[in-house]
Every structure is written in structure tokens, then in C-alpha cells.
Amino acid sequence: MSIQTPAQTAAASTPAHQDFIRQIVRDDLASGRHHAIHTRFPPEPNGYLHIGHAKAICLSFGIAREFGGWCNLRLDDTNPGRENPEFVAGIKEDVHWLGFDWHELRHASDYFEVFYRAALKLIGDGLAYVDDLSAEEMRAYRGTLTEPGRDSPWRERPVAENLDLFRRMRAGEFPDGSKTLRAKIDMAAGNINLRDPALYRIRKVTHQNTGDAWPIYPMYDIAHALSDAMEGITHSLCTLEFEDHRPLYDWCVDHVDLPGHPELWQSVVDAGLEARPAKPRQIEFSRLNLSYCITSKRKLAQLVAEHHVDGWDDPRMNTLRGLRRRGFTPAGLRLFVERVGVSKQNSVIDYSVLEGCIREDLDATAPRRMAVLDPLRLVIINLPEGHSETLRFANHPKDESFGTREVPFSRELWIEREDFAEVPPKGFHRLRPGGEVRLRGVGIVRCDEVVKDADGGVVALHCTLDPDSRQGLPGAERKVKGTLHWVSAPHAVATEVRLYERLFNVAAPESDEDGRDWLVHLNPEAKRVLKAWLEPAAADAAPEQRYQFERLGYFVADRVDHRAQAPVFNRIVTLRDTWARQAGH
């Protein structure tokens, strides 16, 4: 599996909304196979959604929107004990945040009675049987990729006995794991998924929606297929790992035959659905694999449980909640998914492609402000003590509709420490002893004196402002190479700034499968906290307000911790990609 660089991704990109799935949809509409497009997004509520889910969300909801159809949000809650109402709420919030709304909110548990009746039908048709093999024995009987499986000793149980045993499973008569309902397909099938797969297992666990009503629960394959059929889904979009499951998906739909079974259709109506006889079509596409990211729910949960991060919404996490708190925009994520495209080819997208899409959106939408992260005092000695005035700055250099703001200016300013060098390197165009720079929106200053403390550290610069270089005067056109941003020291607002980087310092942190080795790839510099100074107009931000701090990057007011009296800003991305240079790429 190769890693696509930003240049390769851009070169390989196709025009928007031109991919093989959309072509299938167009062909199905043109042929009359379907007259309306119905899709679904079916996450399991056993964790928060992550960056990989963004592609599935944008694809399923986006295609439905583009073709005038609808998309359901269906929670695949067939695995009680691992699922949590907290995750359900988070999933709904994340889908809305990305900019989508569902036609109907559904749960697999809405159809438990239908699944049960469908299983009875399969048993009655001789297509399913109750097996007494343990899970370990079933694996041993299943065979390998090169060897066929063996029939279970219970495979030829009479239909009447299977019906009796399954009803007793439903009644809670048997302990967990003692019996399993299996489809009777072909133990010699080349596709191992067709070697008498499990359809139901016994699990006496309280379900968050149905309580203790059910001691048995359907397996994903039958629940997913029949849910799609019941809801009238026309195109069931899945990632490539489900490609080998498609024959089983079709088997379940075909052999249960919901439209041709009046009793089953009545149970569908009882579940609150209309009878829609369209057969769903499963189509697979490649997952969104992103470098420097973990997408395993187990490993994400481990990061949280072991306090390597500060929760599921930690801005270092690639959960949608974490990306939102980091300041990533829904529009930027949608642009990223569109730019990556849809294909059958697995590849790894470089993280810088995602950051580039976020920058592109923020460049157009983020107002500008000034902030100083590592302050060095600059005193303009030819201005009187207590001098203060108000300047007017544009909020966005490319869009007048953003308006203007007032920015206080005074005799004493904060500038970035790295904008001064006592012994400047070659090519340094910022401030140096005896050198000149332009202060943004003010004029040209010359460094006359460097003030140091007892240890020789630079604590202040004494500078002279050229009065003829002020805005609107003839000297304002005089050329100097460097322009610095600044913040008025008497008016500056102290803030906490959190500088975030990628959580891992290698491109493929999940490649280590032997125990906990992957944790050694955690980036110790992924979060740095410092005290900074803001112009007052930045400190007044509401939570989740995004700005470009001029010359520094894009920042967001933290949605949890930010307060007007105690501002907290997170860095979203730098102004340009600096990671490749830092990593030696």
C-alpha cells in the first residue's frame, strides 16, 4: 500500500462528482432500475466517529443529496454491552456538524422481531440450523483458504427440531455460547463467509433500547442486509473489507425474500416502515487511510483510557469530535473527501493533503487578527510616554465584506522573539541591531538599542519610528524587506495557546501488531501550551470562532475551555506545511 503525496493526489484527482459509484447510480436511474436513490450510513455506536467515517458520511449522504433522494442514519446496535447512548448522541451530533441530515433515524433493534421471523422462515425452508458447536469448534470446522470446511455434526437436524431449539433460544432457555443459529450454504465454498455463517448467537446482555426482551441477537451480516431491504435502500455503500461479504448479503436478501412473504412484510409495516420491494445493491469502495493516524476503535479507546490524550475530543485525536475541537471545518473535511475521490484502490493519503484542504477553506473564511506567541518587548522611544492611538485594520485582505476593526497602538509593543536576531543568519530580513523593518499598519522602525538582563538575555528593544513612514504619508512608500506583526503591550490580552501537531511521529503507527509497540510512536511534541498575547478584538471571540493569526497560522477559540475573561486558543494548522521539513522529508 503506497502513500500518496499531495502532488500525486492533486494529479490523480478527477472532476467533482465523477466516480464509479455515481456512474452506477446514473446508469441505474437511466435504465429504470431505480426511480429514486435511497442510501444509509450505519455506524455501530461503540465509539465516536473518526476521520475514516467522514468519507462514508460524505459519500452516502452526498450521493442521496445529489440525486434528489434520501439517506437514513441507522445505528447498528446488534452488539449489546459494547454500545453506549453517549456514542449514539455523539454520532448524531457529528453527522449534523459535517453538514448532513438524515431522512429517518433508525436502529437495527427496531427490526429485532422481523429478524427473528426471518430466521424462522430460513429454518422452515431448510436453509438454517441450530448448531451446538462452540465458537472454537466452529473455527476448526470452517477450514482454511486452501482447505474446505467440514459439516457440523448438527447440520442435518430436522426442521422441526431446529424450529423448537431456536424458539427455546429465544425464550432464554440456554446459556450464552451454547447454541448458534447458522445458515446452511456450502462448507466447501471458496468464500469462507459462505461456509455456514452464524446468523444468531445467545447473549444474555441488557440492550440499551430493548432492555432484557431479547436473549439472542442477530449477527451483522443478516441484520445489515435485511435492514437495507426493509428500509428500501437502493445502494448500500460499504468499504472494501465487506466485498467478500457481499455474496452473503445477497443470499440473506434473496432467501428471506421479504417482498414475497406477506407475514414478514406485515412485520415490516409493524416496525413503522412502508413496504418497498426494491432489492438493495451493495457497492464497495476503498477506506480513507490517512498517514500519521490511528483508526482502530480499540486503540483510540486505549489512548483515552490510559490518558495518553485528554479524552475523545482531544484535538490530537482524529475522531470527528477531536478534529472539531482542533478547529477543522466541516467544509474543509468535505473538500478533503471530494479531493481524495472514490475508488476501489487502497492507498494511504498523506496527512498534509488534509491540512491543505483545511487551510484552503480557512484562507477564505477566517478573519485576521494579530497575536504574539513568544513575546519580546519593543519600545518606540521617539513616542511620548503613555502614547496611545487607534488604527483601523481590514478583517480580511481578500474580502471587503468582512469589514474592518479597531486595533490599539501604543509606545510599547510585543513582537515575536524570533523576529529579532542580534547576530542574524544569512537571508534574515527581520529586525537586527541598527536594522529597519516595517511594523504592520504603522510604519518603519529602526532598532537603536538592545536591552539585556544580568544573564545576557535580550529583554527589550529600543527603536525609533520614522514619522514620515506612517500610513498616508509620502515616506510610507519607502521600501524595507521585513514586515512584522505586533500587539500593543498595554492593551494586549493574555491567553493560553495550545500548539498541536500530529499525534504520531511515524506515517504508519498501526503497523506494529505485537502488543503495545505502536505507543512508542506517540509524538511528545504533539501538544505544547504557552502564554501568548492577543489584540483585544481576538480575545472577544466566541467558542469555535476561527482566526488567522497573522504570520503564525490558523487558530480557534477552544469550544470547551475558552472564556472571554480567560481566552484559550488552539492552533488548527500552520500557514504552510512545515511537517515535511521537520521530519526530513
Image (cartoon, grey):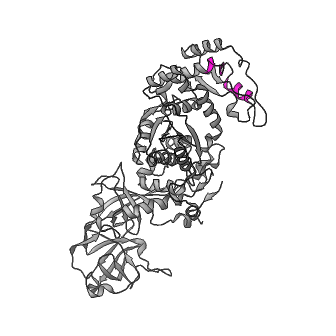
> Who's the residue at 57% across and 26% down the image?
257
> Who's the residue at 50% across and 33% down the image?
76
Give the percent coordinates (x, y) of residue 82: 51, 32
Q: How many marks?
A: 0
User: Is 434 colored magenta in this rendering?
Assistant: no
Q: Is residue 546 above or below residue 304?
A: below
Q: Is residue 137 above or below residue 545?
A: above
Front residue of this view, candidates 449 and 505: 505
> Who's the residue at 44% across and 62% down the image?
359
Inspect this view and state whether residue 243 appears: yes
Q: Is residue 228 left or right of residue 483?
A: right
Q: Is residue 557 above or below residue 367?
A: above
Give the percent coordinates (x, y) of residue 241: 62, 42
Q: Is residue 6 left or right of residue 500?
A: right
Q: Residue furthest right?
A: 147
Inspect this view and state whether residue 525 appears: no
Front residue of this view, candidates 332 and 439: 332
Q: Residue furthest front?
A: 31
Front residue of this view, candidates 489 and 214: 214
Give the percent coordinates (x, y) of residue 440: 33, 75
Q: Which residues are magenta?
A: 122-151
Give the percent coordinates (x, y) of residue 336: 49, 56
Quadrant of the rendering where the C terminus is positioned:
bottom right
